[in-house]
Amino acid sequence: MEMKGAACSAVVVIALACSPSAFAQSPAGGFRQDVVVTAAAVPVEVGSVTRTLTVINRGQIGRLPVHSVADVLRLVSTVDVRARGERGVQTDFAVRGANFGQMLVLVDGVRLNDAQSGHHNGDIPVPLDAVERIEILHGPGSSLFGADAFGGTINIITRDGGDSASGVVQSGSFGLVAGRGQVSARTGSVRQLFAASVERSSGFMFERGFATAGVTSRTAIGEDTRVLASYLWKDFGANGFYGNAPSHEWTNQTFLAAERRFGSWRGWQASGTGSYRTHGDHFLFDVRRPGVAENRHRTHAAIGSFRVSRSVAGRASVAGGAELGADWIRSSNLGDHTTRRVSAFAEWRQAVGTTVQFDSSVRVDRYTEFGSAVSPSIGAAWWPASNVRVRASSGRAFRVPTFTERYYSDPANWARPEVGAESSWGGESGVDLFVSYSWQVNATVFGRLDEDVIDWLRPNTSERWRTYNIRDVDTVGVELALRRTLAAGAFVQAGYTFLDVTAAAVSQLSKYVLDYAPHGLVAAGSVPLLKRVQLAPRLEYRHRTRSTGESDYALLDARLSRAFGRYDVRVEGTNLANASYQEVAGVAMPGRAFTVALAIGR
């Protein structure tokens, strides 16, 4: 892989803080002790993290008008959630201005990205009731996780089995009928969770209806063994998703993952993981012309990894490991292709006293088709006071092209197989300020230099889009956040993100690189109105720029709920201002809609 290196210019980031549950004891004390799994090679206390990290916990998820992982990610202004359909039917995620292919999705630390197309990275096969929390690591993540993590890494952490049951049934506009729930039990050392969800809608316009179903089983045996099995099926109208035609699409996904901790030997802790994922995609470009531009794709991914870690002299730790992986596709349009890789990684973390933390990591990935990539990173954090943390980090990332970017062809698109890998340098530094027991204020500045970025270009609207490594893209931005934790789990929060993206000029129309949101504002909360009545609003504003022009829109969603013991009656509204908007160019989104729901359990 001929990946160009560049010294990244110094940038400053004032970091975004983490989970509200981390402050149960004191502004900094409880925060320091909370454990996260995405910011390092092994789980670490969040107070030692040198990277910008956001955690959305189960308490927030349960209180807000959200029904999918895509909905939850809308709570973070720096994550640009760009839906082609309702309820996460098909959604792209962009972090810090990177495009949808330049971010990484994990489930319990296991890679979920699809080798066929980044548009399938939002096919997350975990019902919302099976999610314990979502950790979002901002900035380059290739030194920890390998390819794709330019803008950030999203890690969905599943719930541990206990003794509980909960569920929601819902009905509303556009013929929506939905239900989801989970049940968990504990028997001796075995903890089992089972979650399921089903949804259907007739749609707000022709060929925009959908039906989805998903199930997840998570089994934990003691503290050392975990097995996850998930299945997701979708059938949805894709009118205008990939061109000016009433398309239709069917996808299905099976995801299996297992982790085993092997105990310690001479101070070394060892663990291993294995996973298999298969994703099917049946795409009909125009339902009026069945058999014309009709594609069937099936991707497979298998990964095995082994890692070790140990403490050194009580103030330092070292971790390392190796990973083998393969992606292959069998497709009526793309053909049959296989990519294999082998990776090795290492990390060093060093504490100086109780207030300073340093870390550095490096990963080497070797691909059969793209060559090698070396991804280093370095970071530092300092607590000058008990309620202030200052930190900085920098790292390199890379991304290999998807099979679609190399081989896909239809009446609107024509890929080029010679496109190669992308590379990036990113940097950040930050301050977290905990003003009091309940207040936290954050501000962030970040920067990234991308090289050989793949874009789809065409000279005019009558030609097909084609892929090229044609762009060098520079991104700088600012993130601001404010949060207040209230009594009994209530909260209010707001975040603002500014982006400035500069790309090398091209003489043709661009599909993705210059399609971003330079301004994004998100505010949400859950507040009591009466003794058993809760109001949970969410406001999102985006100012978008793309090669065809600029647009502004604001989306207001809200939930009003009334508790009756273990039952909740909920009335929800989405797009209450009835805004006309497109998160993806050419793909209209629905107007105002309402639902009524009955929930049981907590």
Image (tube, grey):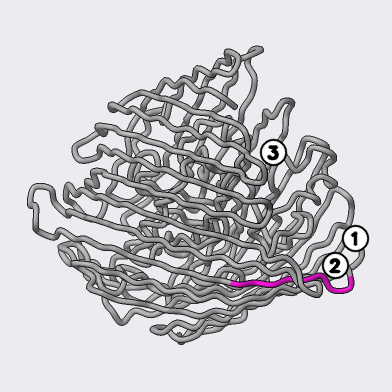
| In this rendering, position of residue 575 left or right of residue 8 | left
Q: Which residue is mark 2?
A: 351
Three-letter amino acid code at the position of disc 2: Ala
Q: Earlier in the sequence, mark 1 or mark 3?
A: 1
Q: CA distance from mark 1 to mark 2?
A: 7 Å
Can see residue 459? Answer: no
Q: Which residue is mark 1?
A: 354
Q: Marks 2 and 1: in contact by CB < 8 Å?
A: yes
Identify which residue is drawn at 18% across, 52% down. Answer: 244
Q: Which residue is mark 3?
A: 483
Mark 3: few/some/many CA within 10 Å (<14, 14-19, 20+): many
> Residue 105 location, x and y as percent?
50, 58
> Residue 590 location, x and y as percent?
32, 35
User: Which element type, helix, strand or loop, lies under badge 1?
Assistant: loop
Three-letter amino acid code at the position of disc 3: Arg
Helix, strand or loop: magenta stretch: strand
Q: Earlier in the sequence, mark 3 or mark 2?
A: 2
Extent of the magenta region: 306-313
Q: Nearer the viewer, residue 169 or 400?
A: 169
Mark 1: few/some/many CA within 10 Å (<14, 14-19, 20+): few
Quadrant for the C terminus, please.
top right
User: Which element type, helix, strand or loop, lies under badge 3?
Assistant: strand
Relative to 561, say whether 399 is above or below. below
Q: CA distance from mark 1 to mark 3?
A: 26 Å
Relative to 7, say whether 531 is above or below. above
| In this rendering, position of residue 404 left or right of residue 44 | left
Relative to 331, say whether 363 is above or below. below
Residue extending furthest toward the right? 353
